[in-house]
């Protein structure tokens, strides 16, 4: 079970969180023309990286905040965690 | 029954307390402190089972967790449990056990015929022999294998025992209470660290219980007892025996199974049987020790052949002689320690040492005691069927290839020592990259991945002095980092005998003309010849060899067999062992009871149960409940002998003719506040929300980004910047997360807050032509006329002193209202509605009637919004705005979603107006078409229409728009039904929707 540092609450076990997928995906702006390809990339196409991956988790049984977690998908090592509005440098 | 093999003095058992037990129906005596294994051996019982494949007689091979043979079926307090290791099961008064793997009995076993039909059972025998003819598998092979070669029988009764889960955090978790574990724990505890020390055996001390060493003027055993006693007094230390750490998971989470009650005749009141500990540790010290490995020789599975360390443990801990004419076969000094113990108790052992001229303190001591030692000698084969009677022995050449003349020597047990294998399972599970250590011919932990350090024998260090020094230091330093205390501890003096280099020898060659079975894996009956076959047939990867031969795949996970298997592969393949590599170690280290893993989450505790505030009223009024997610909802209120069909029909009819009331508390409710609330709704829902006036409700549909309908419900504008959203019962949690996702990540600029209020409001739907009359009586001071409270209107009211929210919304298609009060007043509201409604012939209605009412009206619910449909499919395209953008809109342009013949909701009526159509039935054009019959659609929901008094269903049908009036067949192979049907409009009742506006 992973041990995730919620930037709002501190270290908590994985069973308090739910997974939200790739955090690098950006939703196309509203009312903007979007090509089929762009939209498919947003809705369906994911890289499924092996290695360092920025992903979303929601602290569902805690503060209910969506957070970003930088995690290695192969080793499960967590490098850093960020608040939703924090810039990932 | 006498305990003929129990020595007069010695052992750590309590000889003042005799215990009686039964094995295979026969009664024996043992002592408190015995294991089932030691007690049986004390009574001279060596035959305990049959092997898995060849059903050869099997005895005891070890004395603990590594035991591959002595797996029994245990009976305790009216319950039975399979797969119990006799070497781990502590004796208690009245214990009963039986052999497994034998049919009909351990002494006469039909499966043993396999032993003579070996030609059928070499490596891969399951794949080769039992694959064809295919039809034989279920009828003949499998039942035979199951009966003849099971590993015990699981109980079919409900398990009365309780199992608990516990979550713990600590600074240092220490796995194993041998010398390194004790030293590490003690040093860390002295620095004030929070320490958990776990020992799988009942007694603490590990190897110190059996080794002949002195630590600071005390025997090793006394020193261990002193340390444990002191640790137990410290408030920062938890010391647990009978507790096996079996899994090392991510981020230093380890799981431990504590056997709380298995050593007692029955579990004490309020005690669990087992307790599973989830422990998050800052640092982990792995002090799991090592397991002696066997030397491979002919018939090395005969009862009476066992590890030399096990023989020593039976003698020193349990006071039991495993034989009176022991033969010790060793390639290192450990065998001598066992021989010395025998000699001290008046038994004359013979030692065969594969080494030519070994010299050490231990060997000198053996010589001084006059022990018969034969150097450059090996056991070629054990003789005897159900018990060792003698051994064929021979001298061996220095290159270990040539055997001398074979002699036969009388003996009643053969104690084998092929040196030691560090127990690296936990380290390996943690992600540690293990490395091969040439000096000890075994793998040891390498670079740590997580915060773990392996100490002592588990790290391949067998010197006590070095082990203690390192472990005290590591314990001090790790704890110092955490607590910043630095209490120096004097490292005690150690007196131990120096030992000499072991012999890199592990397998005795076959003598000319002999074809003895030489076993590598004792539990799964994998012999040297099996591995040879696998390699000959082209298997190369050790993982493949393992699966083909089943080497190391039994419940003992190859604790005694893995390394010898690797040695063999490396020898045949002409590779070094590290190049062959070892198979992956996976949790659990040793079998864990399913009950312990499940814990208390069984039966009604497997998920929470949510009840509405009106639940007790429903109960008192004969509600029959149904699970709606985790909620319990009334399905119908039973009157007399009514069944579900009759009861729900009565309730639905009463709604259509009079008035009914339904508990709708379970609907998800979300409070939405903020100046941008309308903008959020406008983006989340498919229809327009910016112009909804205060005091009005609106029905909305929300999509996922892929265009699929996510949920529907009404949202009401309570005040300028305040909205009340309702969701379906099932999607309540998902919708809240969905809103939070967009507010926090996608559109953080929106000034809106959302919070779940599902549990804050109790809800009652009042539906039927007389609902307004009832409402007026409930709220005499409010104007609830069609003008005062029009369809989709909202107002607040006073319900006999309780503040209420009144929404004019309808799911039933009738004139209807929904009243909400704060949850604590839910029951009050409900009773008032029933009381005041009496004159209007009110009846409560459950979910079944609720379904009937909505199906007749063609209103969609979860069975249509099933994660596969878009708004068009549900005839909701009128709610999809063409002007504004919203979540999922772009996806609606996908070609499949705008196809001319797109699926769409329709109504379905059986031609005979009699036969109900099972939900899930497929709609097909031709009921006689060859399979697979092309499916045009499926029945999503069925009811008995109370309006027309005949069956009616909803279906999602391909090209549904153009199918009205068509005749099709509804087929349910599951229910064996073929029903001719006609497709009609999904709006079966009141298609113009006049009633809700009346
Ligand atoms: Zn949090």
Image (spheres, rainbow, N blue to C red):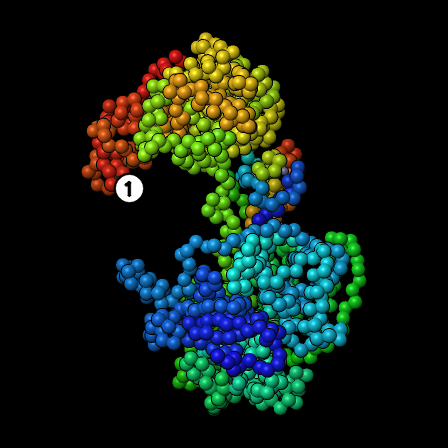
Q: Residue under label 1, please give it.
A: B974
Residue A2 locus on image (x, y percent): 59, 47
Element on which disc 1 rests:
loop
Residue at (31% x, 30% y) in the render: B646
Query: Does residue B76 appear in the picture of this structure?
Result: yes
The image position of residue B989, as x and y in percent, is 32, 20
Decide: is B249 above or below B731: below
- Work out whether B659 lies above or below B451: above
User: Which quadrant: the C terminus of chain B?
Assistant: top left
Q: How far across and how far down the image is residue B260, in percent?
A: 57, 59
> Residue extending furthest left?
B928
The answer to whether residue B740 is left or right of residue B127 is right
Residue under the image location 43 percent in, 83 percent down: B384
Depth order, front residue of B920/B157: B157
Q: Locate ligand 1 by image quadrant.
A: top right
B640 vs B564: above or below: above
Residue in the foreground of this view, choosing between B487 and B404 = B487
The residue at the point 52 percent across, 86 percent down is B325
Residue at left offset 65%, top offset 53%: B281
């Amino acid at each position: 079970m992973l041990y995730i540092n919620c930037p709002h609450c501190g270290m908590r076990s994985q069973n308090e969180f739910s997974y939200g997928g790739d955090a690098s995906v950006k939703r196309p702006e509203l009312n903007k023309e979007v090509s089929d390809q762009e939209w498919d990339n947003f809705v369906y196409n994911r890289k499924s990286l092996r290695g360092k991956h920025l992903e979303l988790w929601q602290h569902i049984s805690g503060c209910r905040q969506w957070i970003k977690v930088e995690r290695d998908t192969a080793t499960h090592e967590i490098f850093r965690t960020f608040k939703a509005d924090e810039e990932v440098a | 029954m006498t305990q003929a093999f129990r020595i007069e003095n010695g052992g750590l058992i309590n000889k003042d307390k005799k215990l009686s037990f039964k094995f295979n129906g026969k009664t024996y005596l043992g002592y408190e402190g015995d294991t089932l294994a030691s007690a049986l051996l004390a009574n001279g019982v060596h035959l305990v089972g049959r092997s898995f494949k060849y059903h050869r007689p099997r005895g005891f091979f070890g004395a603990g967790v590594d035991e591959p043979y002595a797996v029994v079926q245990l009976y305790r307090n009216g319950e039975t449990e399979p797969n119990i290791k006799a070497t781990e099961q502590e004796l208690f008064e009245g214990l009963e056990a039986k052999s497994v793997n034998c049919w009909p009995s351990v002494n006469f076993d039909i499966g043993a015929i396999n032993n003579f039909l070996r030609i059928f059972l070499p490596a891969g025998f399951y794949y080769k022999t039992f694959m064809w003819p295919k039809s034989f598998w279920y009828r003949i092979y499998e039942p035979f294998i199951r009966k003849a070669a099971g590993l015990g029988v699981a109980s079919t009764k409900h398990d009365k025992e309780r199992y608990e889960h516990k979550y713990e955090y600590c600074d240092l978790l220490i796995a194993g209470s041998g010398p390194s574990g004790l030293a590490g724990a003690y040093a860390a505890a002295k620095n004030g660290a929070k320490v958990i020390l776990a020992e799988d055996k009942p007694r603490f001390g590990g190897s110190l219980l059996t080794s002949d060493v002195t630590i600071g003027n005390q025997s090793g055993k006394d020193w261990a007892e002193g340390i444990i006693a002191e640790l137990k007094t410290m408030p920062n230390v938890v010391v647990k025996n009978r507790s096996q750490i079996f899994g090392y998971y991510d981020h230093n989470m380890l799981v431990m199974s504590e056997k709380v009650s298995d050593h007692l005749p029955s579990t004490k009141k309020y005690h669990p049987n087992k307790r599973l500990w989830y422990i998050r540790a800052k640092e982990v010290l792995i002090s799991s020790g090592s397991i002696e490995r066997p030397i491979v020789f002919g018939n090395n599975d005969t009862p009476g052949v066992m590890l030399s360390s096990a023989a020593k443990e039976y003698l020193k801990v349990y006071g039991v002689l495993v034989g009176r004419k022991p033969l010790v076969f060793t390639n290192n000094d450990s065998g001598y320690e066992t021989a010395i113990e025998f000699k001290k108790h008046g038994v004359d052992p013979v030692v065969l040492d594969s080494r030519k001229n070994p010299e050490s303190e231990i060997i000198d001591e053996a010589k001084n005691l006059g022990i018969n030692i034969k150097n450059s000698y090996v056991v070629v084969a054990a003789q005897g069927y159900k018990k060792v009677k003698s051994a064929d022995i021979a001298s061996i050449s220095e290159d270990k290839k040539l055997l001398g003349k074979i002699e036969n020597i009388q003996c009643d047990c053969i104690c084998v020592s092929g040196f030691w294998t560090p127990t690296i399972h936990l380290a390996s599970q943690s992600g540690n990259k293990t490395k091969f250590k040439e000096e000890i011919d075994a793998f040891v932990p390498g670079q740590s991945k997580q915060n773990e350090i392996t100490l002592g024998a588990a790290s391949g260090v067998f010197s006590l002095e070095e082990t203690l020094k390192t472990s005290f230091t590591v314990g001090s330093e790790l704890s110092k980092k955490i607590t910043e205390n630095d209490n120096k501890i004097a490292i005690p003096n150690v007196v131990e005998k120096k030992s000499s280099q072991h012999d890199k020898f592990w397998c005795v060659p076959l003598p000319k003309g002999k074809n003895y079975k030489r076993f590598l894996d004792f539990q799964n009956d994998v012999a040297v010849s099996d591995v040879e076959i696998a390699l000959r047939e082209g298997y190369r990867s050790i993982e493949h060899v393992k699966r083909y031969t089943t080497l190391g795949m039994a419940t003992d996970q190859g604790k005694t067999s893995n390394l010898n298997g690797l040695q063999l592969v490396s020898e045949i393949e002409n590779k070094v062992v590290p190049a062959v590599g070892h198979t992956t170690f996976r949790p659990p280290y040793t079998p864990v009871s399913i009950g312990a893993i499940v814990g208390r989450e069984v039966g009604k505790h497997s998920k929470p149960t949510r009840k509405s505030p009106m639940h007790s009223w429903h109960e008192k009024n004969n509600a029959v409940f149904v699970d709606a997610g985790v909620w319990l909802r009334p399905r119908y209120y039973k009157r007399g002998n009514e069944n579900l069909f009759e009861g729900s029909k009565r309730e639905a009819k009463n709604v259509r003719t009079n008035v009914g009331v339904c508990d709708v508390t379970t609907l998800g409710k979300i409070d939405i506040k903020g100046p941008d609330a309308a903008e959020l709704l406008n983006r989340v829902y498919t229809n327009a929300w910016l112009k909804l006036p205060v005091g009005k409700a609106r029905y909305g549909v929300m999509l996922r980004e892929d265009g699929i309908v996510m949920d529907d419900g009404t949202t009401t504008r309570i005040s300028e910047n305040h909205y009340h959203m309702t969701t379906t019962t099932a999607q309540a949690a998902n919708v809240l997360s969905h809103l939070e996702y967009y507010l926090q990540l996608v559109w953080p600029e929106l000034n809106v807050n959302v919070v779940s209020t599902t549990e804050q409001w109790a809800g009652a739907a009042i539906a039927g032509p007389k609902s307004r009359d009832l409402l007026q009586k409930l709220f005499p001071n409010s104007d609830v006329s069609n003008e005062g409270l029009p369809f989709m209107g909202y107002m607040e009211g006073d319900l006999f002193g309780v503040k209420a929210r009144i929404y004019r919304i309808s799911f039933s298609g009738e004139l209807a209202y929904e009243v909400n009060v704060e949850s604590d007043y839910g029951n009050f509201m409900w009773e008032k509605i029933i009381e005041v409604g009496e004159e209007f012939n009110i009846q409560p209605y459950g979910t079944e009637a609720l379904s009937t009412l909505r199906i007749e009206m063609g209103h969609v619910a979860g069975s249509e919004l099933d994660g596969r449909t878009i708004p068009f499919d549900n005839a909701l395209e009128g709610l999809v705005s063409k002007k504004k953008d919203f979540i999922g809109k772009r996806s609606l342009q996908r070609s499949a979603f705008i196809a001319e013949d797109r699926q769409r909701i329709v109504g379905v009526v059986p031609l005979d107006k009699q036969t109900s159509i099972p939900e899930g039935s497929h709609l097909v054009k031709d009921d006689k078409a060859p399979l697979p019959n092309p499916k045009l659609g499926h029945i999503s929901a069925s009811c008995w229409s109370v309006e027309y008094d005949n069956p009616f269903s909803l279906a999602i049908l391909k090209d549904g728009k153009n199918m009205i009036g068509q005749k099709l067949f509804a087929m349910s192979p599951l229910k064996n039904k073929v029903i001719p049907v006609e497709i009609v409009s999904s709006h079966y009742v009141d298609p113009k929707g006049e009633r809700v506006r009346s």
